[in-house]
Amino acid sequence: MNLGIASDHAGLELKSKILEFLKEFIPSAKVIDYGMKGDYEVSDYPDYSKVLAKDISSHRIERGILICGTGIGMAIVANKFPKVQAVVVGDEYTAKMSRSHNDSNVICLGARVTHWERAIEFVKIWLNTPFEKGRHQNRIDKIRTIELGIHA
């Protein structure tokens, strides 16, 4: 699996912990760090979210993890790109359902609102949950139609 991860300054510490977790949890995964790297200077979440979302949209990576203060800003930006289904996750049920029913490919986390141990649990659930397809695929197809500008 090819994964991407990015954060702004607010999510830098949580991103480091998730990167450590991913190395142990999926050692065979190729994980691309889209930044922010190294220091805590203020940065703008759109700068990081758009690069990761562009690579999801073009199928360079399969899934992504975005982290800012609340996860909301990252999700707003990521969802501007075709074929990106970014969700803000704040509990275990949402992590599971966002994959099983919505086929989300980007999980957005809030470093200021979620303890790092819970955030890692959300990522674990999200990575392990398959898309159920079936009746849910029809709904995803409707989303794709909306993306194409066909609002019938």
Image (cartoon, rainbow, N blue to C red):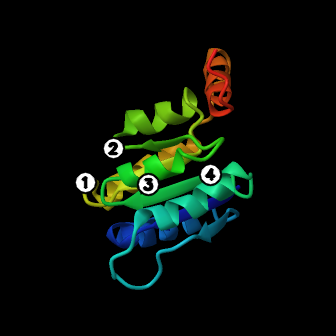
Image vertical order of residue 130 relative to residue 128, above or below: above
Q: Position of residue 114 (x, y in %)?
A: 28, 54
Left/right placement of residue 59 relative to residue 45 reads: right
- Look at mark 2 in the image and give the residue it sits on: 90
Mark 1 and mark 4: Cα distance apart in space:
22 Å
Q: Amino acid at mark 4?
A: Arg
Q: Residues within 10 Å of mark 3 (few under 14, many from 20)?
A: many
Query: Would residue 30 be seen by someone viewing this image from the given angle?
Result: yes
- Look at mark 1 in the image and give the residue it sits on: 113
Q: Where's the C terminus, which quadrant? A: top right
Q: Position of residue 35 (x, y in %)?
A: 51, 74
Query: Which circle's residue, 3 or 2, is located before the other in the chain?
Result: 3
Secondary structure of the residue carrying tag 3 is helix
Which residue is found at the position 37% from the left and 66% from the top?
11
Look at the numbered discs 3 and 2 and tell me whether their residues touch, using CB distance below 8 Å: no
Look at the numbered discs 2 and 4 and tell me whether their residues touch, using CB distance below 8 Å: no
Q: Amino acid at mark 1?
A: Val
Query: Which circle's residue, 1 or 4, is located before the other in the chain?
Result: 4
Residue 26: image quadrant is: bottom right
- Look at mark 4 in the image and give the residue it sits on: 63
Which residue is found at the position 51% from the left and 60% from the top?
49
